[in-house]
Image (spheres, rainbow, N blue to C red):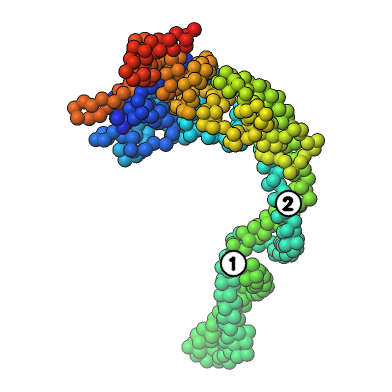
Amino acid sequence: MLEELRVRNLALIEDATVHFGPGLNVLSGETGEGKSLVLEALDLLLGERSDRELVRTGAAECAVEGRFRLDDRTATRLREVSELVEGGGELIVRRVVGADGRSRAWVDGNLCPLNVLKAVGGLLGDVHRQRDQLGLLRPDAQRGVLDRLAGIEADVTACAEHFERRRRLLVDADTADAEAETRLARIEELRDAVKELDEAAPTTGEADALSAEWKLLTKSQDLVRSLATAADAVSEGEGAASARLAQAARAVAGHAGLDPRIAALSERLETLRIEAADLGRETARLRHAFDPVRGRIDTVGERLDVLRSLGRKYRADGDRLVERHVALKAELASLKEAVSGAALRKEAAAAAVAYHATAVALWKRRRDTAATLSRDVTAALKDLRLPNAVFVADPGCAKAPASFDATDAHPWGYGTPRFLVSMNVGEPPKPLEEVASGGELARTLLAVEGALAGAHHIPLLVFDEIDAGVGGRVGLPFGRRIKLLARHHQVLVVTHLPQVAAFADTHLLVKKSVEGGRTRTVIRALDVDGRVEELADMIGASGARNLAVAQARDLMKEATA
């Protein structure tokens, strides 16, 4: 429960600390005194959006801090939604809003994102304003009440998952059928491409290596041709140097004995002949040593032609051809594994079976809970001075279908639960929104909240003028019903009805004052005498103050009887 609330620089509230008690807390005061500001402060603590207009004129920021006392159940649930919540039975929440509209929040001293604060706040308190009564007119809100009371919210989520899975599978099946012909054509195209690339088997770095080798090989061919030319000139060709030197050596050798100089010339010619013959043999050897590259250059050239042709065909040069090969194989495998429309529809049928089983179980729980809710709310409405009212919680359909029925299937199950009511004898129950006046709707909301009390695990319930439109004759029953609700929760009620305020365990008065030329809203807890005076003011018997005070004392006695 909320034990303490401190508010600084929030509109007309300069600095106020409010202590709340268990049970029923009443907030009263004249219209415009600032009661709504207390609710604005609570909204900030519970994670609602901030507004820079809330910052008091001249202040840099407004700040709201709340101290909550936690029971074990609430503490456990809070730790499940945020690790920021520390152990122990106390929780401190703080929210600051700057004049620029930016806000910051802390939970147990730890900075807290707004979405986490909202999740935490959703487990701490629930604020009902006058406009929220209209929410009860929405079918989804009515179903939510029934589901919460039945304790089936997790099962509803599972049902919605089955429903969505079936829907998605059917969409995918239609898409698969529409794309089947295109997919088959693409598979054939990919098979041919992958087969061609598999046969070529390009490897990473291969094209670059072959290109480099091709350049070397083409230069080697030039060398072979040069060596052949040299070999021909030295020893192998017609008129080669070695043959002509041999001829010269023979011609001179026959005259070597005539003169020493001729002999020396003959020796030199023979030496030249021998060197030329040796050069010819070495040149021929080198030519033959490099000559085998002729076969390799053909091999390399043919391989480069294959890779370049495939690169042009698949728009991928060099190593990108290898990547393209891998991508085409992956696409082919993916298309082969694509589930057919028939297979998807089979899965959708299984999802429908799972949905049906869950939806039927939900319908049964709603049916049983609806009967209890109808009885309890009808009895509560009679206590609230609607003696002829009949409340009917319709589970959505009279009977669950024997098998999956798409015509009445919804994410939450079969049928659409709704609340019906008849306020007059002889009138059949009709949808709540068609027959309920403002006062009747307020009483119906209170009766429903009362029925939910045991299943509603939020410790703090806040009602902002829930009794609007309720006359004085209904005030006491209305207050008594709220008091019953306060047995299960800490309840904070903003009210103008003295008959409701008389039931307060803690009564807080909101009042404006002017000090130092500035208007301030002050909140103070009333003692017994203060409560009597405030109730008398709320009764407002003009010119008969003593009578109003007496009536106030009587109301308090009746409330405690």
The residue at the far right in this view is 402
Dot 1: what SS?
loop
Q: Which mark is residue 331?
A: none
- Quadrant of the rendered structure where residue 464 is? top left
Dot 2: what SS?
helix
Q: Nearer the viewer's eye, disc 1 or disc 2?
A: 2
Upstream in sequence: badge 1 or badge 2: 2
Tag 1: residue type? Asp
Residue behind mark 2: 173
- Quadrant of the rendered structure where residue 235 is? bottom right
The answer to whether 486 is drawn above or below residue 318 in the figure is above
Residue behind mark 1: 317
How dense is the environment of label 2, judged by Cα within 10 Å: few (below 14), some, or many (20 and up)? many
The residue that appears at 60% across and 85% down in the rendered structure is 232
- Contact between marks 1 and 2 (CB within 8 A): the answer is no
Q: Position of residue 414 (x, y in %)?
A: 71, 36
The residue that appears at 60% across and 36% down in the rendered structure is 434
